[in-house]
Amino acid sequence: MKLDHNFIKNTFIAVLAGVPVTFKLILVVLLFSIPLGVVVAIVRMNKSGVLSKIFSVYVSFIRGTPAMVQIYLLYNALPVVIMRFFQEKGIGIDVYGIKGMTYAYFILTATYIAVMSESFRGGLSAVDKGQLEAAKSIGLTPFQGYYRIVIPQAMANILPVLANNVTGLVKMSSLVFAMSVFDITAIAKTEGARHTTYVEAYLVIAVMYITLNLTIELIFKLLEKRIKEYHAL
Amino acid sequence: MRFDIVYLWKYFWKILPYLRVTLEYAGLSLLFGLIFGSILAAFKLQKYRIIRYFGVVYTAVFRSIPPVVLLFLVYYGLPQLLLNTVGIDIQNEEKILYVIITISILSMVSLSEVIRSAYTSIDKGQYEAAISSGLLPIQAMVRIVIPQMIYVALPNIGNIVIYLIKEGSLGFTIGLVDVFGKANSLNQNSYSNYILEIYTALALIYWFTSILLEKGMKLIERRVSYGR
């Protein structure tokens, strides 16, 4: 099979412009989805209340529908309807002016709050309920109880699943090409189409994604080792 | 905000028949994934390091690649590769073949992990007891070990099936007409007038399918755990 090495080099250089976009996306999504995922997990674990049920439905929807469908709903379908509504009422807000990147942040974070909360639910419920009760009985507020006592203990359980989630996020970030965001995959698509060197372009980004994900898994494995040593004390 | 429930209903029933395509590639990919995943799991359990490393590297590579990228690679690259190496011409095959190949590879990797952990979780004493009571190795595997593995692996396999269906939705990017592809063409034909209704119907179809699958898996789990 003939692979044009020149194209591989050129595509790689072109794709590099998309790497910061992907990184920004991943970091922002993780920044918001981890804390909010913990909150949703805790709310769902205390099964009482309307909020818990709403969150359950929300998580079920996110897990049951493909990311692409969510993207099409929120990026393609919803703005059209909202714009028609605004035009009828004479409101001058331009929904079409919102950049694709904003949608990307929003949609990926919404998905990952659900994903994280599922992982955290498992890890948090593995921690003995007595820990939280003991914390409350010595005067800590629930927030302090969770933050200082429960969550650190849950960390050892959560880390492997968290590694999986982060690599999943990297993979899901490749879908933002559908929102006109110029990330790695989007640039590869356009570069490939330019000279029909599709295979070279996608091979380049395949290697990039694989390297990135393997590095992330390595980092998490090291973290897990550290935490295990800490727990063994 | 105009959202016509009547059209939602109408489009729901227009899109639903194409669920058959989705279930086709999901089912076939699950089948291939189980077969090749078992082989890959066996590789990872070998004592010979080379075979084991091949399995580990294969798993690491295909677990780290985004499904879209793999799909595009398979779609654009595989026909050329096969033509130049083995001389098989698949350029005129249906698009669903590429989706099946891609999803099979992805599911094979996940399933190999599930099968491997299920296998190692079964007490070796079960196999030894079976052998010592006169069963052939293959009988011991099929009648004693594998049924216990199924019980352990079932929840994870259920998750993987839902994952298959969701990742397969990307087939529309190469032109496959499954539920997603049909929704797209319906939307184009109606000049995006009913875009919200169409994609909401699509989302509902996926959501209901995944809920049904979850309930189905729970039923199967209960059946399989009879007697525990």
Image (cartoon, coloured by chain):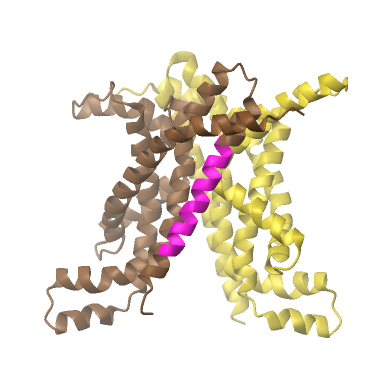
Chain colours: A yellow, B brown
Q: Establish if A144 lies above or below A136.
A: above
Residue A18 visible (yes or no): no
Q: Front-most of A58 and B164?
A: A58
Query: In the image, what residue occupies the spot 76% across and 64% down?
Result: A49
Q: Say which quarter of the image contains residue A153.
A: bottom right
Q: Is residue A14 left or right of residue B49?
A: right
Q: Residue A83: image x %, image y %?
A: 77, 23
Residue extent of the magenta highlight: B202-219
Q: Say which quarter of the image contains residue B188.
A: top right
Q: Establish if A61 lies above or below B51.
A: above
Q: Residue B55: image x %, image y %?
A: 32, 54
Query: In the image, what residue occupies the spot 58% across and 69% down?
Result: A157
Residue B204 drawn in magenta:
yes
Q: Establish if A135 lies above or below A44.
A: below
Query: In the image, what residue occupies the spot 60% across and 52% down?
Result: A60
Q: Front-most of A74 and B111?
A: A74
Q: Residue B89: image x %, image y %?
A: 22, 23
So how many labels did they put on this image?
A: 0
Q: Say which quarter of the image contains residue B6.
A: top right
